[in-house]
Amino acid sequence: MSEIEQRRIDPCSCGSGKRYKHCHGAFPAPWNDILEKGFQAGKARHDAEQARRRHQQGHGKPIISAKLGDVQFVGVGNSVRYGTWKTFEDFLDTNLKLVFGKHWADKELAKPENERHPLFSWIAEYARQLDLAPAAPSGIKTMKSVGAHSAYFGLAYNLYLLQHNSELKRRLLRRLRLRSEFHGAYYETCVAATCILAGLKLELEDEGDASSTHCEFYAVEPVSGRKFWVEAKSRSPGKDHTNIRDQLYKAFKKSADVERIVFVDLNVRDETLDETVADVLTSAVRECELTMTIDGQPTPKAFIFVTNFPAHLNIQAKPPRRMIVPLGFKRPEFGVGVGYRTVEEAFKAKRAHAPLYLLMDRFKAYSIPSTFDGEIPQFSFGTAKRRWVVGEEYTVGDTEGLFVLESGIVLPESKEAALVFKHGGDLVIHRDTLSDAELEAYNAHPETFFSILDRNARKERPETQLEWFEFAYSTYKDTAKEQLLEFMKDAPNIEELRELDQDELAIRYCGGFARGACPGSH
């Protein structure tokens, strides 16, 4: 059999018993080294791209898109949209208008302005702000975000996430089109989007089944299969208090067969809330635990998230902060103000409810992607160029030859990049000035600025015992039990430690590390 006919995965024809690719078909040693380095470099860049995409697009299905000439194709669930969109927001604008429909829009526009659906005031203010914004050479306008922009594109992104990851139910769309029910339905899309971005799979209820009460949807953690019953309640706007008793009562009136999550939106202007809001809400929930009953029966347990993001209440102003307060209803192990005896106990409680903490993180970090492919916008839209890529070859100054970029850090204060190059066996440090656009790109995604994933880039120093614990655990969680015992060989209870499994031993070691790094309260 000739080498051309010999498949690389077949046994080698020489009779050695090895596969051809590991025998007479093996690449020479230098080629093996080159291929290995190329593979590792490609993998590092892929890991960086995936991390950046998750940061922008969350843990649900990624944006699926392709470009042919000037035409952009975007997957939406099982369908495909196409158009000449330059940014992902351009696509979201088109998609939202398709969802609501031209017939509905024409009927609303025929009404007097003060009777129209709130969506039209958002669109008008956004268009006004966009007209004032300067255009870049690429034709893309950059404007400061205001409440109208956040509210409008927030709804557009939420609808896309539902279409792409689950389903946009007709009942929800009917409520969104009704002015009287819009804000409650809008909040439901916010909660659904948060669950999707946290990686939870949505299971929607049968709208035609009138035999029982329904939650908004079920949310399932895909790895463990843990299932949550999710309800979203938004208060009417403009109230001068933070009482959520009515919303909790209405949520608890519905039957649930799994763990409950109840989201309640305060729907008040941000400036009406002060630093006591978490304490006030905690006291209110404790009072409800003691006094509230449902049809004469005790109220059920629940995980409660009280939120506030009233961008729609001041559409001309800068978007307000995103507030979320976690509270345990008859769940003493969860929420603000819970006291744990040790940092190990606090970590275990947090890990036991990891999907809930990820929900909080995704709500606080919620943002709308600008690009289709997850690239940093400044690089994607041409305001900056990705000049420095770890693993690539460069000329450095007036020195002859090519230098391989080994690593780099950004020094924001001096607007410079400190770059470490390798040339033969020598390392050379070179500094290069960054443009304002490059610095903006770094600030947006410092961990992937050099096209590899650097989890420590601009990482803030831990402040609490729990933060120190999590910092240590990320390093030692997979360390072999024998190595951990070696680290702890001088502990007075070493014999007891030998009986623990690897995970518990890592937790004990990190607990000691955290107490040493941050004595006092955790």
Image: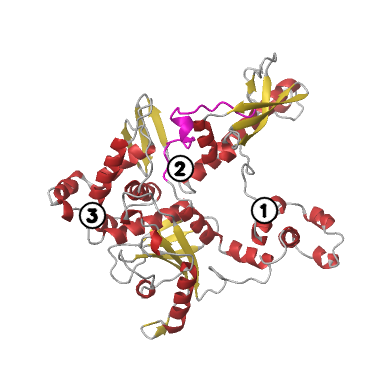
Give the quadrant of residue 262.
bottom left
Q: Which residue is mark 1?
A: 471
Q: Residues within 10 Å of mark 1 (few under 14, many from 20)?
A: some
Q: Which residues are magenta?
A: 368-391
Magenta stretch encompasses residue 228: no
Indicate which disc, 3 or 1, sits on the residue closer to the N terminus. 3
Q: Quadrant of the C terminus?
A: bottom right
Q: Which residue is mark 3?
A: 177
Percent from the top left, x then y, of residue 300?
Answer: 45, 77
- Could you tell me the amino acid type at mark 1? Phe
Q: Secondary structure at mark 3?
A: helix
Give the quadrant of residue 345.
bottom right
Q: Nearer the viewer, residue 356 or 137?
A: 137
Q: Quadrant of the N terminus?
A: top right
* Rendered position, 468 above or below 30: below
In the picture, the disc for residue 509 is none
Residue furthest out toward the bottom? 296
3 or 1: mark nearer the eye: 1
2 or 1: mark nearer the eye: 1
Percent from the top left, x then y, of residue 346?
Answer: 63, 66
Give the alpha-carbon distance from disc 3 to disc 1, as whole Å: 47 Å
Indicate which disc, 3 or 2, sits on the residue closer to the N terminus. 2
Q: Which residue is mark 2?
A: 62
Q: Secondary structure at mark 2?
A: loop
Q: Nearer the viewer, residue 317 or 518?
A: 317
User: Quick check: 384 left or right of 415?
Assistant: left
- Could you tell me the amino acid type at mark 2? Pro
Percent from the top left, x then y, of residue 58?
Answer: 48, 47
Magenta stretch encompasses residue 377: yes
**Residue sitting at 45 percent across and 75 percent down?**
285
- Could you tell me the amino acid type at mark 3? Arg
User: Quick check: 430 left or right of 265?
Assistant: right
